[in-house]
Image: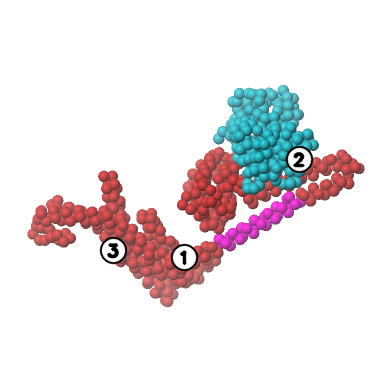
Chain colours: A cyan, B red
Amino acid sequence: MRVVLAEDLFLLRDGLVRMLEAYDFEVAAAVETGPELTRALAELEPDVAVVDVRLPPSHTDEGLQCALAARRSRPGLPVLVLSQHVEQLYARELLADGNGGIGYLLKDRVFDADQFIDAVRRVAAGGTAMDPQVISQLLSRRSQDKPIGGLTPREREVMELMAQGRSNAAIAGQMVITERAVAKHTSNIFGKLGLPPSDDDNRRVLAVLAYLDRG
Amino acid sequence: MYASRSRIRGSMLAAGRSFVLGFAATAGSITLFVLSVLSIAFVLLGIGLITTPYVLHLVRRHANQRRLLAVSWCDVRIPVPYRRFPPDLRTGITGQVERTVLMLKDPATWRDLRWLLVDMTAGYVLLAVSFALMVYPVEGIVLAAGLWRVFEDSTYWYGFVPVSSQATGLAAAALGIAVFHVGLWASRPLLRLHFALARSVLAPTHEQEMAQRIDRLTETRHEAVDTAASELRRIERDLHDGAQARLVAMGMNLGTIEALVEKDPAQAKKLLAMARASSAEALTELRDLVRGIHPPVLAERGLGDAVKALALRLPVESEVNVELAGRAEAPVESAAYFAVSEALTNAVKHSGAERIWVDVHHAEGMLRISVTDSGRGGAAIGTGSGLSGIERRLGTFDGVLAVSSPAGGPTMVTMEIPCALS
């Protein structure tokens, strides 16, 4: 799988290249700046891009803007955005086009190599990988409201994992319950939220986020 | 038709206001002037030392009342030039004497007295003319309507028209109508002129304004320096107790791991997990610290999106409206951001609101931000609340804070900071 990596700090870039290569990714390019990233994405057509939000030369949200622009010219281009901090505002912008293949994670998540690589693979496959921080913010904000408040603690837990973009099997593994139990929880959740059930992982995350987003 | 009707209404209103104000100019100003002169004269006898602050306080209220009317009626702004009393003023008789001395030393006091003189003379004349121009015509019309009969035998002068018959009565009416037209055209400007005259006497001189400005700058600079120093102390403490300590612990663990890795791999693995956990915690702490110094979204996107991001994190439903054509200077953005943050925190904590509206826009060289909540109200500046903190923060940039919060709500916090966008 071919990856384009954009990160301006040498140490992190080097570490990420090493890690991705250790997990059998082919790093097609590892760039430092926004313009370089835009060029690399257009020329190399990678399977997935791993992008830092803040890049030179502006040192603002250049990476995010480049990723959004690249996805406009090539819809569904899988992009995993890494950041020193996560903001719902950015998460919403990334999810807005509804095409999937989006990830938005804190840089700390690379500490757990297995989970990080899992997230890259999920995004490359067109799924989503949202940082638990974004999800928990969203959930806590809506916790007083009825439909979410009506969930049992167990269902809430399932919903959090689901919103991060995990499959039923992954949720079952994490919560140490059977996959059938997860399926039952999810259909309960959809029932309580009034959403038609769907098998598509990506669509269900989007559905959950869209619901949460509805002021 | 509509225009002329509104013009008539405007002039009538001006005349009415002139009439009311006439009382203040005569009765009020004359009384206060006499009292002030007497009180100041009695300072030498001792009695004046006690009475003067009271009398001068009344004078100031009288003048401030006029300032208020000038703005609300004719949009004439008269700045308030009074010096503030020092905060450590003593109470009782000694305090009163100090107050007298301070007030007599304040040049604004003497300007007030001069204004009282002008107000009861020239100021009053302007008001009287403004009022008369709208009222005098009524007499002319009443004369023509039949009142002339009363003066059939003797001659009654209406202006320069001797009234003694229907014909001369009609002439009086014609004159009245002419005067009325002059009044339509002049009574509002006359009222305005009255306030302009008051401004020319009352407004502080350039030097006084400068002195006031220096006082204000000294004060806000003091506060800014204090805030910056305590902020630095807080950051140093947070780093020292938090991230730094965790990194030290991590280094120690790594050292132990080095020694254990061959002897006791299981223990080494446990310590590795601990080291990783501490590095994650150190990162979280650093992240929070950065958010407290300069929030990343603010750095990346500017005030508008930073406020939006802030609102997204609130546990209360909120609506953010931003109209900014560019970005303000970084220090202004930062001050505004933290002020909004504080206002939102207050609203969430104390108001019990179900909804919050934030409006950010820039117009006429002013950044205007309002935070409104649907809560129970009753917020006030200066009761050791977060609002005083906001006021101090904005003060450094000549910004101001206004709070409208009637009991029962809603609360509206408005901030204004003069600044340019780029």
Q: Mark 1 or mark 2, which is nearer to you?
A: 2
Query: Majority secondary structure of the magenta segment?
Result: helix
Q: Name the residue under label 2.
A: A17
Q: Position of residue B97 (x, y in %)?
A: 48, 71
Q: Which amino acid does label 1 sit on?
A: Glu
Taking A146 as reference, is B164 left or right? left
Q: Name the residue under label 3.
A: B125
Is residue B230 rendered magenta in the image?
A: yes
Say which chain tag 3 marks: B
Q: Mark 1 or mark 3, which is nearer to you?
A: 1
Residue sitting farthest toward the front: A43
Say how many tags the image has.
Answer: 3
| Residue contact at pointers 2 and 3, CB within 8 angstroms | no
Q: What stretch is highlighted in magenta?
A: B219-245
Q: Mark 1 points at which residue?
A: B209
Residue drawn 59% across the image and 33% down it: A97
Q: What residue type is labelled 2?
A: Val
Residue drawn 69% across the image and 34% down it: A46
| Residue contact at pointers 1 and 3, CB within 8 angstroms | no
- The front one of B234 and A51 is A51
Say which chain tag 2 marks: A
Instruction: Tell me if residue B87 comes above or below residue B414 in the rendering.
Output: below
Mark 3 element type: helix
Q: CA gap, disc 1 to disc 2?
A: 64 Å
Q: CA gap, disc 2 to disc 3?
A: 88 Å
Q: CA gap, disc 1 to disc 3?
A: 30 Å
Taking B261 as reference, is A162 left or right? left
